[in-house]
Amino acid sequence: MFVKMGDDPERLRRALSKMLRFTAFVSFPAMFGLALVAPEFIEILLGPKWLSSAQLLRIICIGGAFLPLSLLFSNFIISRGKSGIYMWNTIAQGLALLAAILVIHFLGGGIFAMVWAYVGITVLWLCIWGIFARREIGFPFVQLLKDLLPFMLLAAASMLFTSYVTSGLGSIYLLLPLRIVVAAAAYLSLLYVCRAKILRECLDYLFKKTH
């Protein structure tokens, strides 16, 4: 799609912005939701002895929410014929991750510090991909924040609300599906109240597909 748009910067900026919003619309609630149900998910899937890994999964989910956004940016760079930028930027990210893990290891840091470093570098590299997008088509960093922050904040608020209202339930077999349903309802309700355009567009698309 990006290739077919040619060299029209304004059209490319609009398309990239819309795709960022849609990706954030899905990615943040999906990953934050998995972080919310991590203890129940781990215990049911793997058993109680793996329950201690739930906190690690929660941290990884934070970084995982940003990975599809970085992937979108990297594909955009490739579509512009800048495979060299993609290659060297990917290599640099890998080296940064390796260096962070080695430094933390030599300083005596544990696995939690390494996972947090992974999350930090993942978020940082989204910003670096954004810099290259700005160089290519003048995509402003402020626009990146406008496209991502609303969905990130609404998803986080939905998960906090869900955690609070379901905290008294004891059975993990009831807690897991209930949290999924409540979180999804809370997130979609907040989007509706905020009149999110992407929600209306998705609903219109679904209704067209079913009729």
Image (cartoon, rainbow, N blue to C red):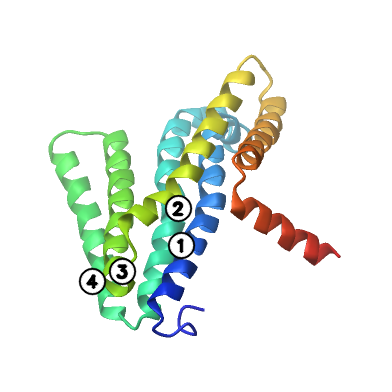
Give the residue type that dot 4 points to: Trp
Residue at position x 26%, y 34% in the image: 110
Residue at position x 41%, y 81% in the image: 8
Q: Is residue 20 above or below residue 175?
A: below
Evaluate if marks 1 and 2 touch, with contact meaning CB atoms under 8 Å apart: yes
Q: Is residue 165 above or below residue 42?
A: above
Evaluate if marks 1 and 3 touch, with contact meaning CB atoms under 8 Å apart: no
Find numbered disc 3 in the image and state the secondary structure of the residue it sits on.
loop
**Residue identified by numbered label 1:** 17
Locate residue 126, reporting x and y percent.
33, 56
Cα distance, mark 1 to mark 4? Answer: 24 Å
Q: Hey, which quadrant is residue 205 in on the image?
A: bottom right
Cα distance, mark 4 to mark 3? Answer: 21 Å
Find numbered disc 2 in the image and state the secondary structure of the residue it sits on.
helix
Residue at position x 49%, y 85% in the image: 4
Front label number (4 vs 2): 2
Earlier-in-chain disc, 1 versus 2: 1
**Residue identified by numbered label 3:** 138
Binning the other alpha carbons within 10 Å of mark 3 as few (below 14), some (14 to 19) or many (20 upward) gives some
Of residue 83 and residue 198, the one placed in the foreground of this image is 198
Front label number (4 vs 3): 3
Find numbered disc 1 in the image and state the secondary structure of the residue it sits on.
helix
Give the residue type that dot 3 points to: Gly
Give the residue type that dot 2 points to: Asp
Earlier-in-chain disc, 1 versus 4: 1
Binning the other alpha carbons within 10 Å of mark 2 as few (below 14), some (14 to 19) or many (20 upward) gives many
**Residue identified by numbered label 2:** 147
Front label number (1 vs 4): 1
Residue at position x 52%, y 79% in the image: 1
Evaluate if marks 4 and 2 touch, with contact meaning CB atoms under 8 Å apart: no
Q: Is residue 73 left or right of residue 136?
A: right
Find numbered disc 4 in the image and state the secondary structure of the residue it sits on.
helix
